[in-house]
Amino acid sequence: MLCPFKRLLLDALKDRRAVGAFNVGNLEMLLGIVKAAEESNTPVILQIAEKRFSHSPLEYIAPMLHAAAMRAKVEIALELDHGCTLFNVRRSMDLGFNTIMFDGSMFHVDKNIEETKKIADEAHARGVALEAEIGVVGGAEGGAEMQANCASLSDIIKLGTQSSCDALAVAIGNAHGHYKGVPKLNFKLLEDAHNALPDLPLVLHGGTGISLSDFRKAITMGIAKINIATANFDAIVTASQKYTKTSDPKSSNYFSLNELMVEEVYNTTLAHIKVFNNQEPLESINF
Ligand code: 13P
């Protein structure tokens, strides 16, 4: 069922776990993610970044995500990830997204607060939640490649207290896509941010490639939402490669490829969910 983003995250923060926010590009990804969520009886967030609309047009993907959320046996929130333009923020709300992640991270903090607050006020008036971002998450979420740049603690506190956001994505050395080396997260900054803003759910973007122990450590320091995109895009590619290698070309068909894609995404998502739920020992998770 569709449920409020803010409550999902506040529950997670209180229970010291994180809600997985999984980016969706097509039907196979959606089916795999929802299957993993239902089987583990865990709420999830389904999202798509504005920069991905050229591959997955909003008018097609939004009704699909909405239908999945309405039918699912678990709680689901729907987010526009990295919303950049007011035009697409409004279109997403019109099409049923109940959270907007407004990415004002390219602005100076004062301008980021001003722009985020404007969108937050409009979103809140429509019962929609708002996630803000501070500092530069490295890599690329469908746009230009960015150099990771940690936020300053004072900017985190300023945006967290003055923008009316319901959750705050903090850049702590994380990056979208495949990490070039071993990810080094600034846990001291994260801990300070959480101590300064203990009731504000913090968000970790660029989840793919972060170690399982770092996920768990981040969760103890206020991370209540973790974004995963590349791992599931890779799962679709892996499924296609496996299919091409193992299936007999004469009997190959879309439907068995579809099932393999759903299965790969399901396995990837379920493993992440188990880590984020922060209950099972990491050694017992088949990652
Ligand atoms: P990854 O692609 O690194 O998993 O990051 C996802 C993300 O942060 C989406 O906003």
Image (cartoon, rainbow, N blue to C red):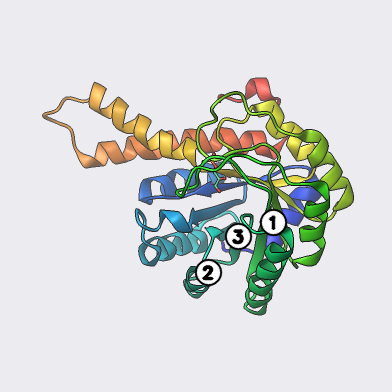
Amino acid at dot 1: Leu
Q: Earlier in the sequence, mark 3 or mark 2?
A: 2
Determine if residue 279 is in view. Answer: no
Q: At label 2, which amino acid type do we have?
A: Val
Nearest to the eye among marks 2 and 1: give it: 2
**Residue at image coords 82%, 35%:** 188
The residue pinned by badge 2 equals: 89
Q: CA distance from mark 2 to mark 1?
A: 21 Å
Could you tell me residue 194's position as x and y percent? 83, 46
**What residue do we see at 33% from left, 38% from top?**
259
Q: Between marks 3 and 2, how big is the CA–CA gap?
A: 9 Å
Task: Locate residue 226: give its quadrant.
Answer: top right
In the image, 265 versus 49, the foreground residue is 49
Q: Is mark 1 within 8 Å of ligand 1?
A: no
Query: In the rendered structure, which amino acid carries the disc numbered 3?
Result: Met
Element class at badge 3: strand
Place of residue 42 in the rendered image (x, y in percent of width and height, measured from the top left): 62, 46
Q: Nearer the viewer, residue 226 or 248?
A: 226
In the picture, the quarter occupied by the C terminus is top right
- Horizontal side of 255 relative to 97 (left or right) equals left
Name the residue carrying label 1: 8
Q: Which mark is residue 101?
A: 3
Ligand 1 contact, mark 3 (Cβ < 8 Å): yes
